[in-house]
Every structure is written in structure tokens, then in C-alpha cells.
Image (cartoon, rainbow, N blue to C red):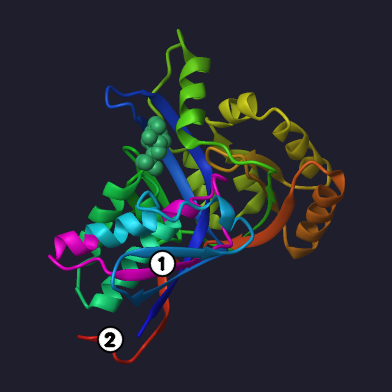
Amino acid sequence: MSVTVRVPAKVNVQLGVGAARPDGYHDLANVFLAVGLHDEITVTPADELRVTCDGPDCDQVPLDRTNLAARAAEALAARYGRSPGVHIHIAKDIPVAGGMAGGSADGAGALVACDALWGTGASRDELLDICAELGSDVPFSLVGGAALGIGRGEQLTPLEVGGTFHWVFAMAGRGLSTPAVFREFDRLGEGTDIPAPVASGELLAALAKGDPDALAAAVSNDLQPAALSLFPELADTLATGRAAGALTALVSGSGPTTAFLVRGPESAAAVAQALLTSGTCRTVRTASGPAPGATVVDAAETIPGR
Ligand code: C5P
């Protein structure tokens, strides 16, 4: 008996960041787009909670209770008064500590998988509440598609997308810590008046139209200067992709993955090739979005209550 859930990565096409709040978080105007790079989470009954992982970067994934997938299983089990005895296997393809919500994807995936395995029948809103407790980006991993996230980023409004956007992603040789990037944002902004973030009307219109040129003109990431300050070599990666014909280039979320919007599969191949041969990144991937959120792709027939 097992359940497998596929969960997408995300790129932030807008990441508007306000001043630090008293609770240490930042108000965001966060426009998420889910893209077709996935982790797959498989859960199987076990005597105790256990996490395993395979994939290119799996040696950097914590296998203890700090893993968001383990915390998701514990949170769901606690809410339904049952044991969290489950083996969670993560087949990892989303870069680790890359700014593409890989950890969040595993949290949302484990939650949906355990819900199906245990037949808890939790409502979508309950699952979203647990996601928001787990982390700011976790609710979006559950819903996928495209959405505006405000507050910490967890209060979501789904967005219409009128077409498919094609991307190349360049993975860096090391990760960046999200809290460290936010701290650097605070340091760089010290003494300045940081306005409250608002979603860009041009950007939302470009998404709704499915227009890559308009989207390229409207993307923004307020964390980019902080990520570049901590990881200056990323500027070379961005310049390489732009020179190879990307419509725009930006740091994905808190980085260090860089994202290149391209017109279609042909220019994706050219940009990917240029990035690979430049030596300014570790590896590249192409993916398009929007992609669906956490989805059960395989479930045994013997699941109780289903
Ligand atoms: O919510 P999550 O645990 O994913 O956030 C990780 C870290 O990122 C937080 O501890 C905080 O340092 C930073 N963060 C923030 N403002 C947000 C979201 C995250 O400062 N809106």
C-alpha cells in the first residue's frame, strides 16, 4: 500500500518585498508560477516516521524531523489523533536550497500523500492551513498554477494564465539560505524607506494574456540585489543567458537558481547550451509553466476509505 504525489517547483515572476515586520517576516507581493520540474513523494505505512531521498542533490536533504515532509506528516497525524508512522521517500529533481521551493514541494507532497494514505478526508482549506504553518511557500506548492501570495506569501489568490511560458533554469554550485538572503535585504535597505509591496498590473496582464514579451518587461525580484550581494558570480550567469537570447533573466526567489524566460523550445535549447558551456553554472534545466499543483499520480486500491 503506497501513495505517490508529484509536486512542481516554482519561479517567482514578481517578488515584491516590504520592510521587516515585528515578527521578523516581510510582507510580500509574490507572484508564483509553478513550472514542470518535479519532486515525487511516496508514502508507505511504517512503524515509525522515516524519510529517505534519492536524486542528484539528495546528500544535502535533511532526513530528520526538520524535513518539511516529516513535519507535514506529523502535523496531519497530530490533527487527526493518529500515529505518524510512515516511510516518506522523496525522489528529488528540484534543486536543493535553490529558490524554487523544493523543500516546500516536499512538505505539500507529503501532506497530500499522507492524507490519501490515511484516508483522513481533510478539506482543502484544512490542508492549506497546515501548509501555511509549515512555511510561507508551502500553500502554493499545493495549489500550483499561478497565484498572487500576500502576507508572508501564504495568502493566495489564483491567477489566470493565458498561455505557456518557457524557461531555462541554471543551477548554481552551492545553495543560498532564504533567511540569510532576507537578512541581507534588510542590511542593504537599512536607513531607507521601503514601500509596501504591490502586485504589478502590467505583470498580471502579461500572465493573463500569455504574452512572454510583456512578461519579460514586467518581471521583478526585490531579493535579487541581496542574492547577488551574497553570490556575486550569479551576475555572470544572468549576463550569459541574456546574451544568448533570453527575453529576461532573474534570480528565482531567494536564489541562487537563475531563471531565463525564452520564447519557445528552440531558444530554450540555445540559452541552455550557452549557459552550460560558459561554466557560470553547475547544470541547466528547461521547464514550462504553469504546471498543476500537488497531484496524486499513483495510489494502491486498498487505501482505506477511498
Ligand atoms: O516561511 P518560511 O519558513 O519558508 O520562511 C523561511 C525564512 O524566510 C523565514 O524564517 C524568514 O527569515 C524569511 N521570510 C521572510 N518573510 C517572508 C517569508 C520568509 O522574512 N514573507
Up the image or down, 203 lies above or below 114; here it is above
Q: Is residue 176 part of the magenta span, yes or no?
A: no
Q: Residue at x 48, y 36 (%)?
A: 178
Q: Provide the residue designation for mark 1.
A: 294
Up the image or down, 222 lies above or below 193; here it is below
Q: Residue at x 80, y 60 (%)?
A: 269
Whole-percent x, y for residue 142 in the image: 37, 61
Q: Residue at x 44, y 56 (%)?
A: 63
Whole-percent x, y for residue 238 in the image: 73, 38
In the rendered picture of this protein, how many numbered marks are placed on residues?
A: 2
Amino acid type assigned to the residue bearing label 1 in the image: Ala
Q: Residue at x 27, y 22 (%)?
A: 22
Whole-percent x, y for residue 28 in the image: 39, 35
Q: CA distance from mark 1 to mark 2?
A: 19 Å
Between 52 and 111, the one nearer to me in the picture: 52
Q: Provide the residue designation for mark 2.
A: 303
Toward the left, the furthest residue is 81
Chain part drawn in magenta: 76-104
Report if residue 125 is visible in the image.
no
Report whether 168 appears left or right of 133. Answer: right
Classify residue 268 by image quadrant.
bottom right
SS under mark 1: loop
Amino acid type assigned to the residue bearing label 2 in the image: Ile
